[in-house]
Amino acid sequence: MTVLAGAGVLALLLATPQPAVADSAAAIAADAGAVAANYDAQFFTPTSDIADSTYNDPATPDVDIVVDADRTPTVATSLQGGAPVAVVNGTNVSVVPPSLGTGSTVTTVSSTTSVTTGASGSLVNERSENRVRSLIVIDNAAAPTTYTYSIGSPDIKFVTVAESETGSIIGIVNSVTGEALGYLNPAWARDAANVTVPTSYTVNAAGQLVQTIEHAGAAYPVTADPSVSFGWFIYVRYSKSEVHNAVTYAQAYGLRYFTSRMCGMIPNSIIRYACNLFINAYFGSVWQTFLYAHNNNRCVEVKYNYPSPHYMVGWKSYSC
């Protein structure tokens, strides 16, 4: 997550940190980063497995899957006030994290990492080309179990897109234009023994993100990771014949077979899995889109988030 730092914090950053403080912050960052890397290795599909080109196997009439660079939003991330800030298509979508209490300090570890340390834990703030994250490090049982994040820009809100098998799918949306600017990766938390700690996201009435971390009885420190991905999307494009194939099959054998037909056409196993995982959350709308396209001789495009996990984030029919 990102921080909009006040003048007091900025002044603190301008001061040269004591070596012991800097060393401690670097150690916290390294330990939290190791936990996150272990989680990513187990549960995320590397985006390098998805080429920036067509997946279509020429030997089979499967749908095309492309990462369309021409439609990729402009994303710029930076560290400001020791925290990662993201600007998407010129819109500041910086996320203000929870306070760690009075007397918290910020230490810049590198050009991509900083650490905010408070009485009950730390935030390890990181930025990369298309993602920002804040690893929450909880030091003791007295720490809070809920952490609330808001967006620095008043028109930008967290929105619960849908519920899935992996929990709530949370997007970051411009409430005026409706533009989707980013998506949160699934909530996770691990303790010092690498045991999973229950955690989840909700969005409150003010459009703020609330992460609950049920860390009682855990081996401390507990590390949790709210992270936001921006920019890249995968577009799955169904031709007219492929739309007709999916719809007529479902009409002949029952709507329950629509999912297997629609997702089964996808030649890449990663995106095919994502289709099967998330389609139930949006089934009615997706089916109506395919049915409209079938009746009007149009194509269909389904949009997935590019960084893993590949949430289904949009669908439309179009003239082709």
Image: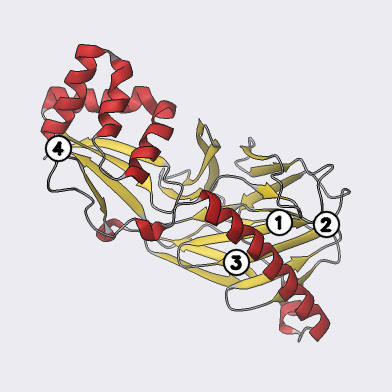
Contact flag, marks 4 and 1 (Cβ < 8 Å): no
Neighbours of disc 1 within 10 Å: few (<14), some (14-19), many (20+): many
Q: Position of residue 5 (x, y in %)?
A: 68, 67
Circle 2/circle 3 CB separation < 8 Å: no
Q: Dot 2 corresponds to which residue? A: 139
Sequence order check: which comes first, mark 4 or mark 1? 1
Q: Nearer the viewer, residue 195 or 13?
A: 195
Q: Element type at marker 1?
A: strand
Above or below, 128 relative to 253: below
- Separation of residues labelled 4 and 1 (CA atoms): 45 Å
Instruction: Rate crowding at label 4 as few (under 14), some (14 to 19) or many (20 or more) other CA atoms within 10 Å.
Output: some
Q: CA distance from mark 2 to mark 1?
A: 10 Å
Q: Which residue is mark 4?
A: 239
Residue sitting nearer the eye, 55 or 128? 55
Residue occupying image coordinates x 38% and y 30%:
279
Name the quadrant of the C terminus. Answer: top left
Mark in front: 2 vs 3: 2
Q: Residue at x 21, y 26 (%)?
A: 246
Secondary structure under the numbered disc 2 in the rendered image: loop
Q: Give the label on residue 126, or none.
A: 3
Choose the circle earlier in sequence order: 1 or 3: 3
Amino acid type, mark 1 = Ile
The residue where tag 1 is placed is 136
Q: Residue at x 45, y 51 (%)?
A: 308
